[in-house]
Each structure stands twice: as C-alpha cells, then as structure tokens.
Image (cartoon, coloured by chain):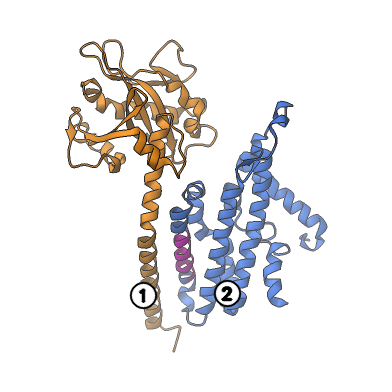
C-alpha cells in the first residue's frame, strides 16, 4: 500500500471526514436535549431577575411557574397573536423585520397583589449583542389615554462580549438598580423611553439614568435597544387588559 | 521509568507554558477564577491525550502530504465534543470559557505534541505524553488562577476565604489581579522562580 499515492490520499481524507462527521452528528444529537434545557433555564432565571426574584439553576423552573402567570405573543397593535410560542421567539430575528410584522413576546407575572409584565429586549453593544428583560408594574387606575404599564419595576441586562470593566458593567446592579421607578411615557402618555445619560442624569427626571463612563457606545446601544424594542409595545401598554 | 518521565517532564523542565511558551493566550484569559481554569485544564488534558492517542494509532497510515490537516480534523473533532459536553453539563462554566474551549483547536501545545511526538511514537507513550503536557499546562493555569482569585477576589472556587474582618480593617482586593496584564506578570514571575532554581533552563 502506497501512502504517498493520490488515490490513497483522497480515500483516506474522505473516510476520515465521514467518520468524524458521523461522530459529531451522534454527539450533537445525544446532548441536544440537555443543552436546550440549559438555555431554557437561563432564560427563566433572567426573566425572574428582572422581577427581583433570586433563583438558581435548580429552582428556576419552579419559581417561574410560581410567578409567571401567563405569556403571549403580541403584534405591534398590541393584539394577541395565536400560534406563536412566546417563550421561543428569537428576538434577534424579530428585530430584523419591519415593526409592523414583528411577533412580540410578553410575560405576565404576579407578585403579591401587583401585576407585572416582563418585556424582553435585544440590541447591539460595542462588540456584539446585548439583551435583557424589563419588567413593568401594572397601574390599574389611570386616566383615559394613559398607559397601564409605565413604571419600570426592574431590569436585567447582559452582553456577549462588551469591554471588561467598562461596557460589560451593564450586567451589574449599580447600573441596573437606578432603572427602577423610571417611566417610559411622559405625563401626556407619549412614549419617550429611558435615556442613558453620559455625565450624570438629572436625579429629578423620571426618564434618565446614568451611563457608564468609558462605556459610551455600549450605553448608547442600550438606550437604542430600549427605545426600539419597547416602542413596539406602546399600544399594548395602553390597552386595558 | 521512561514512561514516567513522559508524564513528569512537562510539569517542570519541559513545561508547555513556562518553558516552551505555548498556549499563553488562554492561560491569561481563563484564569480569573479557579473553576473555569480547572475545567479548561481538564478539557486540554482530554484533548491532548486523545488526539495524541488517535494520531499515534494512525501514524503509519496517514498520508504525509495531508498529515497536518488530518491532525487538525482529529483535534477539532475532540474539541467540539468537549465543548458540547460542557454546554450540556456545566453550562455556567462553559459560558465563562466561551470561545476559549473552541480555541483549544489552535492551542500550539496540541499541534506541537502531535507533530513532534505522536507522529513518531507508539500509542501508549503518546497518550502519556498528551496527559503530561496537558497537565503541565493545567498546573500553571491552576496556580495562576489560585493567585488571581485569592488576591483579586478574596475567594477560592467561588467561596470567600478572606474573612470579612480583614476588609473592615482596611484590606482591599487587588483589582489589577482580575485584569489580563497581571496574569502575564505572574507567568513572568513563575518563569523567573523556575529558572532561578533550575539553571539548566536558562538560555545562553
């Protein structure tokens, strides 16, 4: 057998590729259920974090059942869409569509006597994607035309690879806690989102939080993310349901 | 005796990181905490050992013209398997290691050992050589992670070890330890210490 010959080289490489491909396919298929479950648990933990509920990998499923009472998919008019599982919506794909065509997931929660809705957000940081969940407390009695969901109850942000010590700090409590109590509509019911302000937010303003020094592009990306994702929900926030 | 040397030498006199200066990039990146460092070390040990074993078994059949590609395919296969297993069973750690598990493929230790050792030695010796080199890499990684986590975060394996009282007396964690440049400085210190008692290693 001549290991130098062309025929042998071709046959050998073909055989190796087939063996390796088969092996990988088997491994990937066998491990997929466990991996899917991990991602699912993480998502539940993130949603709970935005509601200020601490969870770990073991009890996340149970706590999720306990707090999240309903979940549904909305269109941009705030109407429920049937046939789309809100938990498995890929926000990245949805954000690429025109606003009118997006499927928007929403998760309803109850904690004590208060009702909440949790909205997932997805956007771009400096180096890669950033994402998060924003929870709103429901106000039952509001004047006509004003939104039921306006005040932020909690937020959870995370990122794929923002600069350590700068942009990556968006997943830290010192950045996230000031969002609590901020409002995304002004007094007349116009959507204004929340601004991430460089150089110090006005403490009296209900629409501003401090940006991260040195993390300007991440902060701006976060502001754009909140704006572009939450604006699609403005009709839903105003509906009385 | 010779086999034992295959295991022991890479830990000290032929250490992949401090003597051969291979695999530095991941050593800086994943050593902020002990746990990812340990998982990374185990992953590298598994991949070096088994890729050495597989390549050594096939060393007489591999067409010489495409041997590097064949080595790469074997390494890539093992790395993907390890990555998938980590994602399925230690999800949090796999997130911390992020791209670095994938980058084991490009870790020079692997290709170096395959080309220099496995292509010309028997499977069992190659397997031991793989374990030895993986462990030599892991040893430095864990030493680094120990120092960086202890001085940088005051904890080990995620558990607080420096008592609260110290902090109340004014002790502070060294934030520099968490940043990659400090890892490079510590690697430098380890190399210095190692060479100062082992004069053989000093280049003329």
> Whole-percent x and y of residue A142?
26, 13
> Whole-percent x and y of residue A4?
45, 83
* Callout 2: chain: B
Residue at 52% across, 32% down = A166
Judged from this view, the residue extending furthest toward the bottom is: A1
- Which image quarter is the N terminus of chain B in? bottom right
Q: Which residue is mark 1?
A: A14
> Whole-percent x and y of residue A191?
28, 18
- Which image quarter is the C terminus of chain B in? bottom right
> Whole-percent x and y of residue B189?
74, 48
**What span is in magenta?**
B71-82
Q: Is residue B15 above or below residue A170?
A: below
Residue B78 is inside the magenta segment: yes
Residue at 73% across, 31% down = B166
Quarter of the image where one finds residue A208: top left
Callout 2 crowding tier (Cα within 10 Å): few <14, some 14–19, many ≥20: many
Residue A10 in sight from this viewpoint: yes
* Callout 1: chain: A
Residue A131 in sight from this viewpoint: no
Callout 1 crowding tier (Cα within 10 Å): few <14, some 14–19, many ≥20: few
Query: Which chain is in orange here?
Result: A
Residue closest to the eye, A50 or A63: A63
Q: Which residue is mark 2?
A: B118
Q: Is residue B8 above or below residue A75?
A: below
Which element type, helix, strand or loop, lies under badge 1?
helix
Residue closest to the eye, A46 or A158: A46
Q: Work out how far the residue at label 2 is from the one at label 1, CA to CA, in angstroms.
A: 22 Å
Name the side, left or right, on which B99 lies relative to A234: right
Name the side, left or right, on which A221 lies relative to B164: left
User: For chain B, what colour was chosen?
Assistant: blue
């Amino acid at each position: 057998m001549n290991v130098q010959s062309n025929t042998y080289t071709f046959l050998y490489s073909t055989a190796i590729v087939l063996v390796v491909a088969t092996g990988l396919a088997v491994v990937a298929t066998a491990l997929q259920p466990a991996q899917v479950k991990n991602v699912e648990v993480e998502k539940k933990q993130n949603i709970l974090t935005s509601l200020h509920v601490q969870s770990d990998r073991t009890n996340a499923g149970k706590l999720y059942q306990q707090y999240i009472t309903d979940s549904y998919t909305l269109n941009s008019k705030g109407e429920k869409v049937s046939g789309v599982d809100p938990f498995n919506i890929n926000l990245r794909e949805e954000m690429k569509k025109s606003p009118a065509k997006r499927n928007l997931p929403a998760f309803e929660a109850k904690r004590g006597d208060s009702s909440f809705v949790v909205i997932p957000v997805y956007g771009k940081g400096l180096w890669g994607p950033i994402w998060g969940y924003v929870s709103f407390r429901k106000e039952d009695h509001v004047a006509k035309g004003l939104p039921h969901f306006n005040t932020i109850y909690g937020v959870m942000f995370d990122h794929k690879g923002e600069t350590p010590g700068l942009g990556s700090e968006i997943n830290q409590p010192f950045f996230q806690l000031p969002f609590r109590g901020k409002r995304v509509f002004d007094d007349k019911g116009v959507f204004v989102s929340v601004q991430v302000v460089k150089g110090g937010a006005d403490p009296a303003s209900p629409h501003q939080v401090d940006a991260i020094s040195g993390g300007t592009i991440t902060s701006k990306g976060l502001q754009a993310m909140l704006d572009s994702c939450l604006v699609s929900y403005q009709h839903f926030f105003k509906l009385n349901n | 005796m010779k086999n034992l040397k295959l295991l022991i030498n890479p830990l000290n006199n032929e250490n992949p990181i401090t003597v051969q200066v291979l695999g530095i990039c991941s050593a800086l990146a994943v050593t902020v905490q002990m746990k990812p460092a340990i998982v990374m070390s185990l992953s590298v040990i598994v991949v070096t050992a088994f890729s050495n074993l597989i390549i050594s078994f096939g060393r007489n059949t591999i067409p010489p013209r495409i041997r590097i590609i064949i080595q790469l395919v074997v390494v890539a296969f093992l790395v993907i398997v390890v990555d998938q297993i980590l994602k399925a069973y230690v999800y949090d750690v796999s997130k911390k290691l992020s791209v670095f598990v994938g980058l084991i493929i490009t870790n020079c230790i692997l290709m170096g050992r395959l080309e220099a050792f496995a292509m010309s030695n028997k499977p069992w010796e190659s397997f031991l050589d793989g374990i030895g080199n993986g462990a030599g890499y892991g040893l430095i990684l864990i030493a680094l992670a120990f120092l960086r986590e202890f001085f940088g975060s005051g904890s080990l394996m995620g558990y607080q070890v420096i008592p609260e009282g110290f902090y109340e007396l004014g002790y502070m964690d060294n934030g520099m330890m968490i940043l990659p440049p400090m890892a490079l400085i510590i690697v430098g210190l380890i190399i210095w210490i190692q060479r100062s008692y082992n004069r053989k290693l000093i280049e003329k």
